[in-house]
Image (cartoon, grey):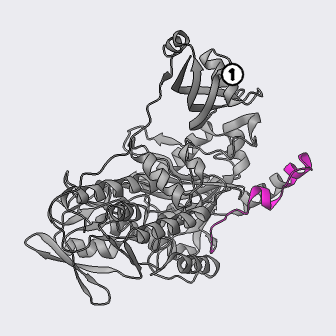
Amino acid sequence: MTLMQLRVNDVRISLLKEKTLKECVADKLGIRKAALQKVQVLHRAVDARRKNNIGLLYHVTVEADLPQAVGKKILSRPGVSLFVPAQPEVPQLGKVPITERPVVIGAGPAGLTAALELAKYGYRPLVLERGRALHKRVEDVDRFWRTGEFDPVSNVQFGMGGAGTFSDGKLTTRVNDPVMADILQAFVKAGAPKEILTEHKPHVGTDKLRAMVQGLAAEIEHCGGEIRCETQAVDFLIKDNRLTGLLLDDGTVMATEAVILACGHSARDTYKVLASRGIGMEAKAFAIGVRVEHPQILIDQAQYGDFAGHPQLGVADYALVYHTEDRKRAAYSFCMCPGGQVVAAASEEGGVVVNGMSLYQRDSGIANSALVVNVTPDDFGTEPLAGVAFQRKYERMAFMAGGQNYKAPAQSVQSFLQGTKPTLWDAQMYLQDLSVKYRDDHPAEKTGEAFFGAMPSCRPGVTEAALESILPNYVSDTLKQGIRYFGRRIQGFDGPSGILTGVETRTSAPLRIVRGSDYQSMTHAGLYPCGEGCGYAGGIMSAALDGYHVARAIMKKYKPF
């Protein structure tokens, strides 16, 4: 007998059958369950390709005591291989002495991950965060959502944790990078739920994300780093096309040889200063649109059929894309938040921006997502800051349409599609009738507002307004085509229960600060553009990955202190 360590992919457990994971692994391998000494989950996903037989799909590692001949036969089966544990990537530490501490501008996912990596290896990074510490920031944002009292220093975009702190906390990414596992482990150590290590679509939720941010900050400081909140770099000191230091908002001049710029996609004043210093940047495509809300049960039933509400499935999400006939435009869902809510996300006075977030439990009863349309420099201009001006224009129009009090313009999906007087009344009456019907049909279940959610959910509130009047015509037209198409994919998506809120403009940075293969600015040595704000990421996980690699690039050049 030989003890073998195996990796077994695509082990399916149907929700129609009561079988354990161990039993299903044994069936797939064609051996007795007793031969399996240990089964550990590597990856778990929902398989909803057949609505009449939804199941769970696992990749696992297995320890099995098997005769040598049986083991050889098993290894010939599809999806079975010897398990080789991943080895952590050992950093290459440079030989150039570094006389000043490396500085990280921004304490979002990219900045915190970069700072943690530097701190672990003795580089004693200094993190500058323009917004407030987390506990104070949460108070400021909550006050804004309750009263409409906006704070340009501390809001959904600025402050400890970055924009991701008030989000769904999704950790999915299209980037396939072997260091993802190490970053997820660091997140778990900092306070994230353990299941993010195995779930196909991991999420943290804004409530648990706050604990994770605090844990990352504590680890950075424990390893010798420092974090200063309410401290902004307002200028970049340059000599011979090399960054030599920073000017802080209190007048302090700080010398430094390496600055990681992880400023986030809403640091428009920083972009302006960089442009004035001739730092290389270029306009890039992004997307704008609205947020759409539906009862979560509508999405669950469309995606899971009769299995909707099954305790092993949780709430359903969706990813939708529509291309116009000429392929020049696309409407697509973005940052979909099951069981969440729409939130005001302004970062400037006189502008309305909306976003979506959810708590870890995703139990609001509301499904919401951005519905956005791609825009390019052909639409707004090739000058690097043209995209910022484009965003600002429509955010200010939304502010005016909402009543100039940070309430967001909103209307029902059907009034938007039909071009009739903007209203929420039709959707709200439909939802009320739906709630009553569901309560009558399911008297034993939790129903009413606690089940369906209070729509529209956006705080500090909404104002009925025509959304097509505050969006470019090509965006509104593409959205209408897209929503009708999505209604053929998800029954009821274009129906009477949907509500739209605008505007969503911060899908990604409207520019890119160009960098080379060494991660440094193409025009100014010592500046390391990083993360979503510099045009190199699109979400929490991809930003964290970029922060990791930028930190490693600095470590490859310089010796630790």
Q: Give the residue at the far left of this rendering.
A: 240
Instruction: Say above or below: 512 vs 258.
Output: above
Q: Amino acid at mark 1?
A: Lys
Other-residue count near label 1 (Cα within 10 Å), few / some / many at <14 / 14–19 / ≥20: some
Q: Is residue 477 visible?
A: no
- Which of 408/1 is in front? 1
Q: Give the residue at the far bottom of this rendering.
A: 251
Say which quarter of the image contains residue 339.
Answer: bottom right
Relative image position of residue 554 (x, y in whole percent): 24, 60
Say which quarter of the image contains residue 451.
Answer: bottom right
Assess whether residue 437 is covered by the magenta stretch.
Answer: yes
Instruction: Say above or below: 460 vs 391.
Output: below
- Quarter of the figure that contains the C terminus: bottom left
- Give the residues drawn in magenta, as a range: 436-460
- Which of 451/527 is in front? 527
- Quarter of the figure that contains the N terminus: top right
Q: In percent of the image, x 47 and y 56: which residue is there?
A: 186
Answer with left or right where residue 306 lies relative to residue 230: right
Relative image position of residue 368 (x, y in whole percent): 61, 55
Image mark count: 1
Q: Is residue 537 visible?
A: yes
